[in-house]
Image (tube, grey):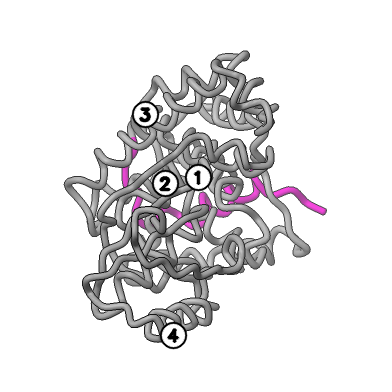
Amino acid sequence: LRQSGYEVFDMLIPDAEAGKTIKVASGLWANLAEAGFTRSDAIVGLGGGAATDVAGFVAATWMRGIRYVNCPTSLLAMVDASTGGKTGINTDAGKNLVGSFYTPAGVLADTSTLATLPNDILIEGLGEVAKSGFIRDGEILKILSDANNAKLLREFNGDDLENNNELHELLVELIERTVKVKVYHVSSDLKEQGLREFLNYGHTLGHAIEQIEHFRWRHGNAVAVGMVFAAELAQILGYLDAGDVAYHRSLLDSLGLPTSWQCAKDADAAFECVLNLMHRDKKARGNMLRFVILDGISNPIHLDNPPIEAVKEAFERVYKQN
């Protein structure tokens, strides 16, 4: 940008969810004011999902909206956070409860930046990739289920990416397919009134885990556990069979993603914490819980106000006792 003659101001934020706070946003607003940003200027969000989230939020709120462009550098950001127009920050009450729907002017996903990622950050992005297969594109699941593909992804080493065409082509195809799934859901439901909510498969429990863990758990890992929980709930209520649940577990496990969770509390106390956070979930209606579950693989549905006994049983199936 500088080489093209633009005046550029660098604004660094803390890594991951630590950057998605009102304090960070306020500091960025102050920087924009000091730099004299007006509606003719633009913000570029360069980094992972948290960076693009907060960049979009600041762009949406500065002068009631200025342009922004996302340049995601992590797999999670490329397939999820940078597209779709959701922006937001976290508060003590929950994740992404403050934000806006504000679409970027453009998204530039340069896959060469994936070479900068450590193994665990690449793998967490696979949680959102797998989710897109579970809710719509069965071909994604076939690709991930291939033993050689799973091994390539699970053993990802950024230093090898430039010279490993097979791995690079695999990642490109998964990114393209996952983004298409997101576009399908977002294009007709930008503000998440119905269809777009299916993108939240695994997120009801996933967001609760992130909150309880003070965001020490990565988003994609929490969503992976959340999908197993949702599959268990669907099986308890007769929407999936035991084989479908086992498929969730085996696929996610083969990619190096977690399929269970534990914290310092016993199961009953942990469930009460989770249940409280679920009631604050953006899908909730009044005091009624709403989940996204599957009525068969790649066929998501809404589940409103399920029996609390079923919710607790599903939770206990993914909760590891200390």
Identify which residue is drawn at 61% across, 52% down. 218
Kindly state the secondary structure of the residue where label 2 is placed.
helix
- Taking the magenta stretch, the answer to whether it contains residue 312 is yes
Identify which residue is drawn at 60% across, 19% down. 164
Kindly state the secondary structure of the residue where label 3 is placed.
helix
Amino acid carrying mark 1 in the image: Leu
Q: According to the image, label 1 marks what residue?
A: 76
Labelled disc at residue 177: 3
Relative horizontal placement of residue 191, taking residue 201 as reference (left or right): left
Q: Say if 6 sits above or below 82 in the image.
A: below
Q: Which quadrant of the figure contains the N terminus?
A: bottom left
Amino acid carrying mark 2 in the image: Asp
In whole angstroms, how far apart are the C-alphas of marks 2 and 1?
6 Å
Mark 2 and mark 1 residues within 8 Å of each other at the beta carbon = yes
Mark 3 and mark 1 residues within 8 Å of each other at the beta carbon = no
In whole angstroms, how far apart are the C-alphas of marks 2 and 3?
12 Å
Of marks 4 and 3, which one's residue comes earlier in the chain?
A: 4
Q: According to the image, label 4 marks what residue?
A: 30
Q: Say if 10 sits above or below 300 in the image.
A: below
Of marks 3 and 1, which one's residue comes earlier in the chain?
A: 1
- Residue 88 visible in rendering: yes
In the rendered image, residue 142, in percent from the top left (x then y), is placed at 47, 17
- Taking the magenta stretch, the answer to whether it contains residue 71 is no
Kindly state the secondary structure of the residue where label 4 is placed.
helix
Of marks 2 and 3, which one's residue comes earlier in the chain?
A: 2
In whole angstroms, how far apart are the C-alphas of marks 3 and 1?
14 Å
> Dot 3: within a 10 Å radius of its alpha carbon, few (fewer than 14), some, or many (20 or more) residues?
some
